Each structure stands twice: as C-alpha cells, then as structure tokens.
Amino acid sequence: MLTIGEVAKDVGINIGAIRFYERKGLLEPAARSEQNNRLYTEHDRNWLLFIKCLRETGMSVEDIKTYYDKVKEGTSTLPERIDMIQAQKAKLLHDIEEKQAQLVRLEEKLERYYRGENY
C-alpha cells in the first residue's frame, strides 16, 4: 500500500489532484490506515497514471468519468471504450499536426530573420 504522498510523487501529480479525482468519482475512495491516512494500491497508481495520460491529451474530467464508469460496467462496454480512446487518439494526432505546422511557421520566421529580413 502507498500513501497519498508516495502515489502523488510516483505519478507526478499533486495530492490535491488525487483528492479531486476521488471527489469526482474518477478514483475509488482510498482505503484508510489506522491513522486515517489514505492508502493506495498498485492498481490505483496505474489508474492515476492513465488518468494523467488522458488529461495530458486533453480529455475532460467528465469524459474520463464516463470512461471510468464504463470500465466498472465490465467487458460489455469494451466497444464503447475503444471508440472513446480512438477518438482521443485522433484528436491528439490532429493536435500534433497543428503543432508541427506552427513549428514550421516559426522556423520560417527565424530563417527570414537570419537572412537579415525585418518581417
């Protein structure tokens, strides 16, 4: 079992975010120690890593909650979950293409500046 501080450090998110995810229903309430401290399993840690991944791709907390609810429903929801992850992947690929185009524009501007142009 891991404390909230250990999980937060390991996953790379703050303690407040973990508590927020619990309040929003994205994470089952943690077990408690005799001192009433939150305790997390390796499964909880892995799920938090995936939540972090989804958030970094731009998925909303509400959509992650929908996804998590489908996970808890069982394997009958696999097609829906696959669709959700594929849609998020497509959005991420689109975002990457946009960022690459922005990078090209910045490189073009720098090249003009290196040639002594003022615009």
Image (cartoon, rainbow, N blue to C red):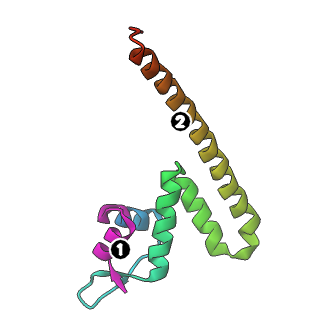
Magenta highlight range: 1-17
* Amino acid at dot 1: Val
Residue under circle 1? 7
User: Quadrant location of the N terminus?
Assistant: bottom left
Q: In this view, does 87 lie to the left or right of 47?
A: right
For mark 1, give the secondary structure: helix
Residue 28 lies, in percent from the top left, at 47, 75
Depth check, front residue: 102 or 4:
102
Depth check, front residue: 90 or 18:
90
Depth check, front residue: 89 or 30:
89
Residue at 55% in and 59% down: 64
Residue 100 lies, in percent from the top left, at 56, 35
| Total numbered circles | 2
Residue 21 lies, in percent from the top left, at 42, 64
Q: Can residue 28 be seen in this view?
A: no
Q: Is the magenta stretch mostly helix, strand or loop?
A: helix
Q: Distance between the residues labelled 2 and 1?
A: 32 Å
Placement of 83 over or under 50, stated as above or below: above
* Amino acid at dot 2: Lys
**Comparing marks 2 and 1, which lies closer to the viewer?**
2
Residue under circle 2? 99
Depth check, front residue: 94 or 14:
94
| Quarter where residue 116 is shown | top left
Tell me which numbered mark, 2 or 1, is placed earlier along the sequence: 1
Residue at 67% in and 56% down: 84
